[in-house]
Amino acid sequence: MSDATTKTIVITGASAGVGAAAARRLAAEGAKVVVVGRDPRRTNEVADAIGADRHIADFAKLSDVHALADELNKLDRIDVLANNAGGIFAERLITEDGFERSFQVNHLAGFLLTRLVQPKLIASGASVIQTSSMAHYRGHIDLADLQLEKGWSPWKAYADGKLMNVLFTRGLHKRHVLDGIYAAAFHPGVVASNFGSTAGGVTKWFYASALGKRVMISPEQGADTLVWLAQRTPPRDWASGEFYDKRAVRRPNKQALDAGLVDAFWTRSVRLIEG
């Protein structure tokens, strides 16, 4: 049984791909969906098609995240916050906020947004869902070099970011499940979307190629676990603090099982957003 019709669901990165597919499906089931995207045209197209509220926010700008949180805090409730925004980037760039772009877009902005709307999430008994990836198994977190001043590459930065999503999920569960916030991370699959357009090199070629399109799954298929987590009610239907693939719990990267690292990473993230 789906509970989606009773929920207000905020989805970031919802202007295309998995986020847009999840927004369409959840809205069709009667949920109040709030669409968040970076590109105004595409975000408005998705929102207009499903009759949803929308907000434009570029997660490479933390000022946009603060402004977004101000708007979301005006909602009566937030039952689900889907931190779906993210990407892979061809170059190592530093944002106007002073952070490496992949680190900021894939982790820090979503962490900040969650913190800024945390009272609303607690009041609503919300679920916070992170779009991670099987790529997180290739990640390795070095607390002394979170922003990869040494050894940066597009896939290293992306894999580390997806591992950070899992660490955040486990930290959020540990700190706030007794407050009524439930957390999960999930793998969407290798999805035919515009994901690779900013990656450069072989990754960009693969995502645009006929071969890639033959072997990848559709955004609708990729959104399945996100939709399932958003529809259902934890802890009755799914376990908080876990990493999911195809609606099933999977053992995550061993670093995510290190409670000391989870705590230290959380503390470091808080210090970064608080300056």
Image (cartoon, helix red, strand yellow):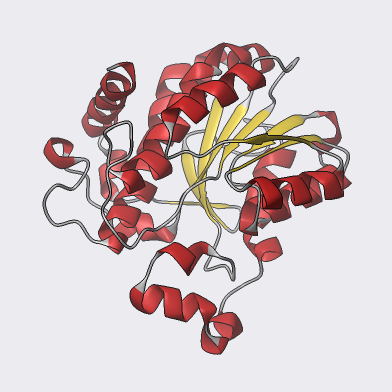
On the question of residue 166 being in view, the answer is: no
The answer to whether residue 147 is above or below residue 206 is above
Relative to residue 75, is residue 95 drawn left or right?
A: left
Residue at (51%, 63%) from the top-left corner? Answer: 195
Q: Is residue 272 visible?
A: yes
Question: Closer to the camera, 137 or 215?
Answer: 215
Q: Is residue 150 above or below residue 260?
A: below
Which quarter shows the C terminus? top left
Residue furthest out toward the bottom: 211
Which quadrant of the figure has residue 121?
A: top right
Residue 200 horizontal side relative to residue 240, left or right: left
162 or 14, which lies in front? 14
Q: Residue at x 43, y 63 (%)?
A: 198
Residue 233 in percent (x, y) is at 70, 32
Instruction: State the residue at coordinates (87%, 41%).
Output: 51
Residue 63 screen position, x and y as percent: 46, 26
Of residue 134 and residue 153, the one placed in the foreground of this image is 153
- Residue at horizontal 47%, vertical 20%? 115
Q: Say which quarter of the image contains residue 259.
A: top left
**Closer to the camera in the image, 195 or 182:** 195
**Quarter residue 182 falls in:** top right
- Tell me residue 175's x, y (percent): 41, 18
The x, y position of residue 6, in whole percent, is 84, 29
Number of numbered discs present?
A: 0
Q: Is residue 30 left or right of residue 204?
A: right
Image: 93 above or below 126: below
Which quarter shows the N terminus?
Answer: top right
